[in-house]
Image: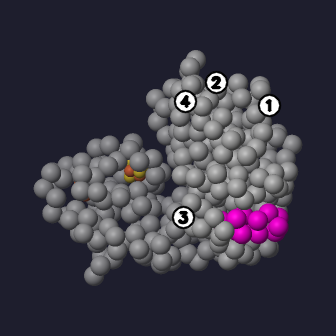
Amino acid sequence: MRYSPFGKTGFQVSALGFGAMNLPGVSLQQAGDTLNYALDHGINYIDTAAGYRNSEEIIGETISHRRSEYFLATKTNKRDYAAAKEEIERSLVRMKTDVIDLLQIHYVNYVSEYKQAMEENGAYKAALEMKEAGKVRFIGITGHRPELLAKWISKGDFDQVLFHLNLAQPFALNELIPMATQMGMGKVAMKPLSGGFIQPVEKAIRYPYSQNVDVIISGMVSVDEVKQNLAAMEQEVEEEERKELEALALELGSHNCRRCNYCSCPIGVTIPDIMISSQVRQTLGLLPKGNGFYERQKDKILSCADYEPCREKPLCEEKCPYHLPMQKVVQEAASYYR
Ligand code: SF4
Ligand code: SF4
């Protein structure tokens, strides 16, 4: 596995990062075994968030005795100073550590949220104060809208940026990754499987591995999953394979959905998941988790065609900043059940 300098932080980070978001769904024993196996096998970047249920506590319980062996990244989704400060203090306690290597302002997708976090009494001030107090080493930002993130990071306030990059969401390549590179920032890609849709896993992991990013965060909950992810990164990606993966990403990403979640559907269709997975489903087939999603959404997807208030003008499409044809994609997705 590759190790690279992480922006200007002075850390060398492993290309595979441990995404701890789903650890609360397994036993503490299994979570601990998985995390310790990952550390034993060269993974040195652990990613969590205050908002991932008790994920931070699991990290504190199971690997804080090995604290010098990993770069620890967490997040706050609070936007105001007081709430963010309180949450960062709580993260330190929960993870049983004196210092958080990277504190990210979490899930910033709206201009109004960015402004709120950056204003005089915003979350950024809390992160900065904690940095000055030696309790946070670096500050980053995460979000689902690469073109907005590219603008925001260009101001020079952040050391790192976390974004989607997978075969079905290649959009960070356009402006965000070049800007982060120019700014000398740490670049972290998340959701290589796009939340459980893209298979085979090896191919899914190798796409972001072929690109100019430092760490790929993969959510793992078992030793087998760690092994599978590590195996996908054993060999570097050669030029020919990279070109093939890029061509596939152009095809699978043609839906253009950024997963910004501006849209909502009154009958509960999970539109971004359908936008992002439809082409994947037809081209590669889905992972079991993706098929489970389609089974759960069946009634809703099938109801879209008959939903009266959307007959004249689809309600969802009015809200999409990218003007995407969501109604058509959702109704075509009904072919899954035929
Ligand atoms: S067009 Fe379909 S997916 Fe869009 S809001 Fe209406 S019912 Fe929901
Ligand atoms: S369909 Fe449009 S509004 Fe909905 S998540 Fe995708 S890009 Fe955002």
- Name the residue tied to disc 4: 83
The prevailing secondary structure element of the residues shown in magenta is: helix
Q: Residue drawn at (48%, 51%), measured in percent from left and top? A: 258
> Magenta stretch containing residue 80, yes or no?
no
- Distance from Cα at disc 1 to Cα at disc 3: 32 Å
- Name the residue tied to disc 3: 25
Res. 125 mark: 2
Q: Are marks 1 and 3 in contact (CB under 8 Å)?
A: no
Q: Earlier in the sequence, mark 1 or mark 4?
A: 4
Q: Earlier in the sequence, mark 3 or mark 4?
A: 3
Amino acid of disc 3: Gly
Task: State the residue lying farthest toward the bottom.
Answer: 338
- Distance from Cα at disc 3 to Cα at disc 2: 33 Å
- Figure quadrant of the N terminus: bottom right
Q: Earlier in the sequence, mark 1 or mark 2?
A: 2
Q: Of tags 1 and 2, which is closer to the observer?
A: 1
Q: Residue drawn at (15%, 51%), measured in percent from left and top? A: 309
Q: Earlier in the sequence, mark 1 or mark 3?
A: 3
Q: Earlier in the sequence, mark 3 or mark 2?
A: 3
